[in-house]
Image (tube, helix red, strand yellow):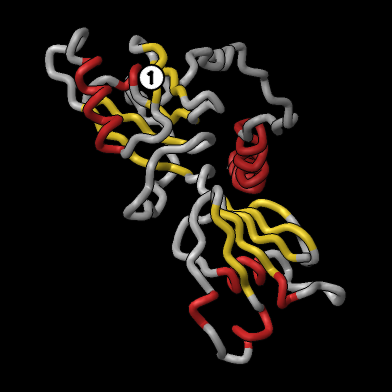
Amino acid sequence: MTFRCAILVTVITLAPYVAWAQDTTRQPAPSTGAVTPSTTKPPAPSTTKPTPPATPATAPATQSPAAAVPTDYRIGTEDVLGILFWREMEMSGDVTVRPDGIITLPLLGDVRAVGLTTDQLKDILQKSAAKILTDANVTVVVRQINSRKVYVTGQVGMSGAYPLVGPRTVVQAIAMAGGLTEYAKGEEILIVRGSMTFKFNYKEVLRGRRLEQNIQLQPGDQVLVP
């Protein structure tokens, strides 16, 4: 009886230690921190180029704006004209009047333009284009006027040719040329127009006398300041 009690006491006393030992054997092994690399390759980058936006097949070309045209204007050399054919872009464009007075157009060839009004040139082009187009419709606009000039020479600040795109008097032309120099003879100025000659007294006009001398200049006029 005494022996059995001793064994029971020993079992009871060792029970907590047996439970502790069993718990420690069940704990998971500590992680080593090593990560197994993935063998899956990333997707290859796309080689397809983005499609650019579509552009119109017939984009209009950049053109200069139309110039202000005097009522008495006639086409002259070095003038720039815009020739526009309706629905015929390959025949349209800007052309410069050559020194011989001729312009050259696609399919139509050489056409004499100098001395004509824009309406007269339009009629000529319309008749020529009607031979190759079923519905010829032409527009002629003036881009630049380079033919209308006056010439101021002699004792002025800057002698040379000056554009005449609107009404301009002798005094205005002299002002464009930088005015009279110190040694200019303002009382003896001449305006030459073809075979005609007009006298001009600069000092009188500045004083408000004989203002009829201050005439409006025409293309080709020469103001001679001695």
State the residue position of label 1: 111
Q: Is residue 139 visible?
A: yes
Q: Residue at x 58, y 12 (%)?
A: 41
Q: Is residue 9 visible?
A: no
Residue 217: percent from the left, percent from the top?
51, 61
| Secondary structure at numbered mark 1 | strand
Q: Is residue 104 left or right of residue 86?
A: right
Q: Quadrant of the C terminus?
A: bottom right
Residue 130: percent from the left, percent from the top?
18, 14
Q: Amino acid at mark 1?
A: Val
Q: Quadrant of the N terminus?
A: top right
Q: Residue furthest left?
A: 134
Quarter where residue 150 is shown: bottom right
Quarter where residue 60 is shown: top left
Q: Is residue 134 left or right of residue 49?
A: left
Q: Nearer the viewer, residue 182 or 98?
A: 182
Crowding at mark 1 (Cα within 10 Å: few <14, some 14-19, many 20+): some
Q: Residue at x 18, y 26 (%)?
A: 137
Residue 169: percent from the left, percent from the top?
53, 69
Q: Residue at x 65, y 48 (%)?
A: 13
Residue 209: percent from the left, percent from the top?
56, 89
Q: Nearer the viewer, residue 139 or 54?
A: 139
